[in-house]
Image (tube, rainbow, N blue to C red):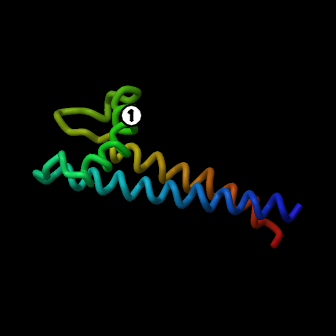
Amino acid sequence: MFIIKNTLGTIAGIFHSFISLYMFLILAAAILSWFNIDRTNKFMVILNKLTEPAFAFVRKKFPFTLSAGMDFSPIFLLVLLWLIDGIVIQSLLDIAYAGK
C-alpha cells in the first residue's frame, strides 16, 4: 500500500510542478504583452507557442474573457490552474500522505 501512496504523491508533485511552471509562463506572457517587444524574438516565439493555444481555447469557450478590447484569458487561466492545483492536486497529496 505504501508503494501506491508514494507513487500517488510523486505524481501529484510532478503535476504541481508543471502547473506552477505553466502559471509562471502565463504570467510572463501577460506582462510581456504590455510592452512593445519584437514578436520574432526567439524567446517570445517559444512563449507564444506555449501559451497562445491555451489562450485561444479560453477565448473560444468563454467569450466573456475578451471584452472592451481587453483580454482576460490569462487571468481566467491563472485562476483555473490555481483552483486545479489547490483542489485536485492537494487532494491527491492529502490522500497520498494521510496516515504517515
Q: Residue at x 34, y 47 (%)?
A: 75
The quadrant holding residue 58 is: top left
Q: Is residue 59 left or right of residue 16?
A: left
Residue 97: percent from left, percent from top: 75, 66
Please determine whether, in this image, residue 77 is positioned above or below residue 60. below
Disc 1: CA contacts within 10 A as few (<14), some (14-19) or many (>=20): some
Q: Residue at x 41, y 27 (%)?
A: 61
Please determine whether, in this image, residue 62 is positioned above or below residue 28. above
User: Foreground: 17 or 94?
Assistant: 17
Residue 84: percent from left, percent from top: 55, 49
Q: Quadrant of the C terminus?
A: bottom right
Q: Residue at x 23, y 55 (%)?
A: 31
Residue 59: percent from left, percent from top: 34, 31
Residue 68: percent from left, percent from top: 17, 33
Q: Residue at x 75, y 59 (%)?
A: 7
Residue that label 1 marks: 58
